[in-house]
Amino acid sequence: DVKVTQSSRYLVKRTGEKVFLECVQDMDHENMFWYRQDPGLGLRLIYFSYDVKMKEKGDIPEGYSVSREKKERFSLILESASTNQTSMYLCASRTGQVYNSPLHFGNGTRLTVT
Amino acid sequence: DQQVKQNSPSLSVQEGRISILNCDYTNSMFDYFLWYKKYPAEGPTFLISISSIKDKNEDGRFTVFLNKSAKHLSLHIVPSQPGDSAVYFCAASGISRNTPLVFGKGTRLSVIA
């Protein structure tokens, strides 16, 4: 069974801090994604990666960056956290070998920026 | 502009009755559709999918119907159970293999015992 693990369930950070959210998957998936979920706005794509060292902007990349140095790990970085980045962050992965393979999500990180 | 729309933010249904969750899309290039279910404090989990070459796919209590001409799909849950109470997201894909899924905003289903 696919396991997507996000390093923290809850985080509280101060405005202006640099924040790292880590995600690891154990199924050798090529594609990895970062979403945020906010009430009334659904799931919005921040960044995604087709494979190691590759990254693409999603719908709301401003204020974020990502790193994919190893296939199993996809990190989301908040360069200077702001209160409007308080949200639930969800990492997901899927194989790139099968057309329309479903996404597998981690359990999320609830980030609060004060 | 939203390409995948779930126009009902919430839905309440009595236990044992049918739940119908609706989803509309605008991009005719989409050819594969998925439903995800999300409980609070957990990540979404894949529920059921349908290819555009079909108009119905069934898995136990869950059935998804696709009307391509209307660009509309629906998820039917029969019979509804209290454990089905969750947020349901409709998603679409198909433009290319590496194109991310496009999600709707979700519908919160409450099944009342």
Image (spheres, helix red, strand yellow):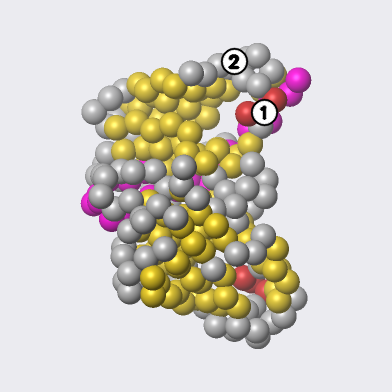
Tag 2 near tag 1, CB within 8 Å: no
Q: Amino acid at mark 2?
A: Pro
Can the viewer see residue A20?
A: yes
Which residue is at the front of the view, A10 or B34?
Answer: A10
Q: Quadrant of residue A41?
A: bottom right
Same chain assignment for discs 2 and 1: yes
Q: Which mark is residue B38?
A: none
Magenta span covers which residues? Answer: B92-113
Which residue is at the front of the view, A107 or B24?
Answer: A107
Residue at 57%, 49% (x, y): give it: B43
Residue at 64%, 53% (x, y): give it: A39
Categorize mark 1 by other alpha carbons within 10 Å: few (<14), some (14-19), many (20+): few
Is B112 included in the stretch rendered in magenta? yes
Side of B105 relative to B54 (left or right): right
Q: Report how far apart the C-alphas of labels 2 and 1 lie in the structure.
A: 11 Å
Q: Position of residue A1 (x, y in %)?
A: 46, 42
Residue at 33%, 51% (x, y): give it: A95
Q: Position of residue A87 (x, y in %)?
A: 64, 63
Q: Return the residue at label 1.
A: B83
Q: Return the residue at label 2.
A: B79
| Mark 2: secondary structure | loop
Position of residue B72 relative to residue A108, above or below, is above
| Mark 1: secondary structure | helix
Is B88 included in the stretch rendered in magenta? no
Which residue is at the front of the view, B70 or A61?
Answer: A61
